[in-house]
Image (cartoon, rainbow, N blue to C red):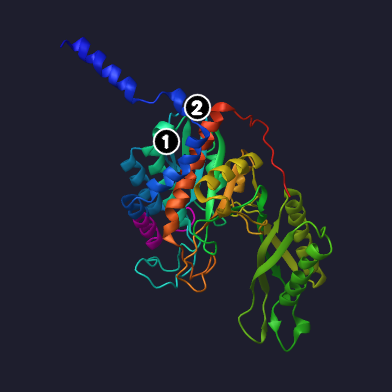
Amino acid sequence: MSYSKWAFLIFVIFLFQCKPISSVLNLSSKELSEIPLNFLNFAKKAEVFDWMVGIRRRIHENPELGYEEFETSKLIREELDKMGISFKHPVAVTGVLGFIGSGKPPFVAIRADMDALALQEMVEWEHKSKNHGKMHACGHDAHVTMLLGAAKILQEHHDLLKGTVVLVFQPAEEGGGGAKKMIEAGSLDNVEAIFALHSHPLLPLGEVETRPGPLAAGSGTFEAEISGKGGHAAIPQQAIDPILAASNVIVSLQQLVSRESDPLDSLVVTVAKFKGGGAFNVIPDSVTIGGTFRAFSMKSLQYLTQRIEEVIVAQAAVQRCNATVTIDSKNKPIYPPTINDKELHKLFQRVAGDMLGASGVKDVQPMMGAEDFSFYQELIPGYYFLLGMKDEALEQPAPVHSPYFRINEDALPVGAALHASLAVRYLLESQKETPAHNGYHHHEL
């Protein structure tokens, strides 16, 4: 047989074997609904599950604080390389951006945070933190693992990708505003929507919690140094007591919530830091206090920013002290409220419902905790949800930010499959109707 006939035969076989692009775009409702379960079954394969567990434990053993996630970032890049996935690094110091798909629009992003907490792990197990005073007590090791799991799923099913998925591995979520720096570095260029999850150690396996609209409050930090004049405790008239001044400040700050704000507007002001003095009988020269303020609207956050400084300075002056107040520093920016896009909520309900059933998708009330995923949501539609990772073997599971925090690794395939399913379904549905995101605006509580 001549070369031309062989070439023609190979071409004909290729046509019969390959699924046309149009057929992928015109998947039936049943075929679309099967994607999440197919992805979940893939993620549950022994070799895939064991691989994810291994990655999670390696990261857990080597926790790194914000903007110090060098080994975690290296592990991510090595795994992306093995999967043949292109990436960009460094982004915002230690961040990584991976790219799967056509390299063309539409673009959708999935985000995972990488940093650990300054906390000593108290859980005694084989893979306990090896870095003294540092621990993955908020599940970010699992977040990275599940995003890598999603990458493996997407790479294995790349024929379903009619567009590009951007994998956002972000540093410094824990107070460092890593999302803001990722945005400044161009992580959202051309991206139309973004998804993220958070592990929930008190929510049963196979369940998710979320809501449309406001999910988590915005938050800022403040710190103040109140200076007086030190002296002996027996002769306070010769001193100017900064401890008394600071005590009056703390009481007055609570009145910002109880007497200056609408009772229907949820606000929280907490002073959680108070440092001053080192002896029982010596009035110190100065005291440092600090804390957080939280609200569900930027208007309320801006009001608190102004009034916290005014109250601290004025109340310190009443006690003849001076005060210097720091709010919204470069390293600790004010986080906006986390507000879920309502159209993405509908997509999430369909995808999660197809995978977990309607009973596995729970509503949740807004929370006063903050999350820097909100910086992405200020610019484009974003969606954030909580993934059940409760360890049923524990009588009293510990919450996040506890030295006894543990997760159920059986949830890793669920998170990975949800990430991948949301990205694929978003891209497929975007082919039918391209949303207009110019001038995007979301509604606060």
Spot occupied by residue 67 in the image (x, y as percentages of width and height): 48, 52
> From where the camera sits, is residue 287 visible?
yes
On the image, numbered disc 2 is attached to which residue? Answer: 26
Q: Answer with left or right where residue 209 lies relative to residue 404.
A: right
Q: In which quarter of the image is residue 274?
A: bottom right
Magenta stretch containing residue 34, yes or no? no
Residue 83 image-quadrant placement: top left
Say which of 219 and 313 sits in front: 219
- Give 194 or 180, whichever is nearer the viewer: 194
Report crowding for label 2: few under 14, some 14 to 19, many 20 or more residues within 10 A (C-alpha). Answer: some
Q: How far apart are marks 2 and 1 (CA)?
A: 21 Å
Secondary structure, mark 2, is loop
Residue at image location 45% in from the left, 65% down from the top: 134
Q: Is residue 402 positioned above or below 207 on the image? A: below
Viewport quadrant of the N terminus: top left
Q: Which residue is drawn at 62% across and 84% down?
A: 279
Mark 2–mark 1 CB contact (< 8 Å):
no
Name the residue at the front extreme.
30
Q: What element carries label 1?
A: strand
> In the rendered structure, which disc, 2 or 1, sits on the residue that comes first in sequence?
2
Residue 133, image x, y percentages: 45, 68
The region drawn magenta spans 53-68
Count of residue discs: 2
Question: Among all residues in the image, which is located at the extreme left?
Answer: 1
Q: Does the magenta stretch include residue 63?
A: yes
Q: Residue 100: which disc?
A: 1
> Which residue is drawn at the image coordinates 73% and 65% (left, top)?
323
Which residue corresponds to the image point at 58% horizontal and 40% vertical from the top-left?
347
